[in-house]
Image (tube, rainbow, N blue to C red):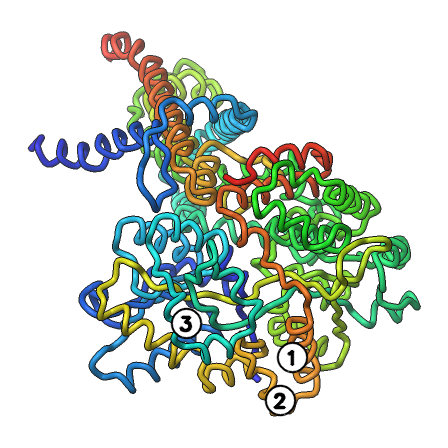
Amino acid sequence: MEPIKASRRTFLSLAAVGALAACGTSGPKSSTPGAAGDGATYWFLTGQPQQAIREAQVKRFNDANSATQLKTTTFQNDAFKQKIKTAIGAGQGPTLIWGWGGGGLKSYVDAGQVEDLSDFFGQNTALKDSIFPSAFGAATVGGKIYAMPVETTTPIVLFYDKRAFEKIGAQPPQSWGDIMDLVPKFNAAKIAPFSLGGQSRWTNMMWLEFLFDRIGGSEVFQNIFDGGANGWSDPSALKALDEMQKLIKAGGFIKGFSSITADSNADQALLFTGKAAMMLHGAWTYGNMKSSGGDFVTGGHLGYMNFPGVDGGKGDPSDTVGNPGQYLAISSKASAADKETAKKFLANNTIDDASVDAWVKSGSISVAKSSKDRLAGITDKNDAEWLKFVYDTSANAKVFAQSWDQALSPTQAETLLDNIAKLFQLSISPQQFADSMNAVIGK
Amino acid sequence: MVFPALLMFVVFGVLPLIGVLVLSFAQWDGLGAIRPAGMANWGSVLSDPGLPHAIWVTFEIMILSWAVQTPVSLLIGTFLAGRQRYRGFLAVLYFVPLLLSSAAIAITYKALLDPNFGLGAGLKIGFLTQDWLGESGLAVAVVIFVVSWQFIPFHSLIYQGGVRQIPTSMYEAAAIDGAGRIRQFFSITVPQLKYTIITSSTLMVVGSLTFFDLIFVLTAGGPGDATRVLALDMYKRGFQANLMGPASVIAVLLVLIGLALALLLRRLGGSTTASQQEGA
């Protein structure tokens, strides 16, 4: 299996893969000089193993369609986010727009920049049915589908170090109460209970996503997402925020967490070097822990589970959050011929057998339902177990919610991340957090 | 010959400035249509409690980094102005930070200061294993330190050039009058470097308004908003929260503050121009 170095989050914030190297490679690299000319264009992100899989998809398409070639341009993640927004705003965007769906996609829809794909999926029902239904939520705006889920589904899971639990003679937590009980035990053994890359802010957010769900059910965030007034001061929301601060005050997180970044993978390193016992993180971190963590994964020390329930909470413990998929939308400004090319690419080359195979081999579950059939072919015992776990978590989730910062509008997401950082610093109270967030609902 | 310069200034200076001014009265997410918003952006930004904080942090970093950089650069510059060969060798070492980009510097310092895997933890030096970037006061201090580390070489270079311009006859005369090295430094070097100090200070002060890359990579404005300077605030509002209007308001404020500071420093220099020329 290929080591999985990159992650969804490497696209979302600073480079995780060789941040230093990224300084010199942030410029766009075009497969054909002057790719802005005629023909369909596709911009995507650098970073392995995803980049190679995307390039192979385009190559298969171009080999099969010599008349309508797809031209690609790759970007380093941070450069991409700004460049594509500016380019779309200026009418210079690519035909195929790669993204994370949710609030970002909605802003394109509101600006009339992306094509409604409802008819396309209406005509290609087999294609639609081959994808996990949960992946379509973040592609749907106002009942219409504006993007096709492609690539991988990555839930957020609770990782733990089996060695740390053996050391203190305890079992992995089955409830929020267990977590609170474990904190003093690990601290007494000089092991931090939880690793956290708090400077990245979205890392803290994953905790709230689960606590909101487990305490109040998925409706609490759904209500906020739908623009319900004062959604953040729902009693369950306030309780979740309060529980969060209790864990922080109890010393649940490694000392100095607010200066640790996820981009450098330091949070993962804390787990696999035995400095921290547990870590709540995206499924995409598995590959890096395997390749960088010595025998942590290969020696069977890595444990994982879905986030446990909270006693008396209303949420379904099968629910998960994370990234139901990555998304490809088609620019409404492209020519009719280019749109056709793009649709052909979507239909034939994004979740074809070769792609699904490649994603599974890279340690991820593809958004295609057929991922399950591929699992039997995985020979590495650890990988097979892990992939089955990720598949089951995604497939069995009653609600697979999209990460808040992706689901909400960019304006709300930025306020949210700011306030989460302050909440974790204990510099604001749950009520203050709710007040600041209520003020931007619907913006 | 004026025309090309003027054209550049208009295209890259004046036009964007006008654009920003117009946008500060508009509502725009960077994608859709630009809609006029009247005073709404100004109202929301000026009433935001985050703004005085950002201004305070900006000035705090500006003043403290000036206070650290100026004496150190002055001393190093004076030292390096000597013609001895070992000083030439040291000069090369001192100027190394000038070769590095802000992003590379920030990433390196971030790695060195990591509380769990950084220099302190690696060498088991207790003093160095602080939560450098995770505590508000420390984070500001680190930013000032790294900024100084990065720019002291540049300002030393300016001072080195300045000191070399001072006629040696003045030092010789002073030596005959019995002035020691310290006396010479304060009575000849520093007064003679008046213009250089003003130039260097203007660059530091105005430059510090636009510190962005370094802070963005080092702390991203954190912890909380402890190092969220105006330039970073502008970026976050504009490019992360998609609020180009309010971001433009901050941009206009930055321009105004920068102009005011530059004019102030010019005035400080200008008032002494006449007497200096008379003296010369």
Q: What SS does tag 3 mark? A: helix
Work out whether residue B82 can be spotted: no
In the picture of the structure, the residue carrying the numbered disc 2 is A378
Above or below, B20 against A220 in this view is above
Which residue is drawn at the image coordinates 60% and 52% (left, top)? A202
> Residue A306: x and y, percent?
74, 67
Above or below, A236 against A197 in this view is above
The amino acid on which the numbered mark 3 sits, given as a three-letter code, is: Gly
Question: Which mark's residue is nearer the viewer, 2 or 3?
Answer: 3
Letter of the chain that mark 2 sits on in the rendering = A
The N terminus of chain A, quarter of image? bottom right
Work out whether residue B116 can be spotted: yes
- Circles 1 and 2: CB atoms closer than 8 Å: yes
> Which label number is shown at residue A387?
1
> Residue A99: x and y, percent?
44, 61
The amino acid on which the numbered mark 2 sits, given as a three-letter code, is: Ile
Marks 2 & 3 on one chain: yes
| Depth order, front residue of A384/A350 | A350
Marks 1 & 2 on one chain: yes
Give neighbour class at mark 3: few <14, some 14-19, many 20+ (Cα, 10 Å): few
Question: Which mark's residue is nearer the viewer, 1 or 3?
Answer: 3
Distance of label 1 from label 3 (alpha carbons): 31 Å
Q: What SS does tag 1 mark? A: helix
> Which label number is shown at residue A122?
3
- Circles 2 and 3: CB atoms closer than 8 Å: no
Circle nearer the N terminus (1, 3): 3
Marks 1 & 3 on one chain: yes
Which residue is drawn at the image coordinates 87% and 55% (left, top)? A177
- In the picture, measured across the screen, residue B260 lies left or right of residue A132, that is left
Circle nearer the N terminus (1, 2): 2
Which residue is drawn at the image coordinates 38% and 75% (left, top)? A123
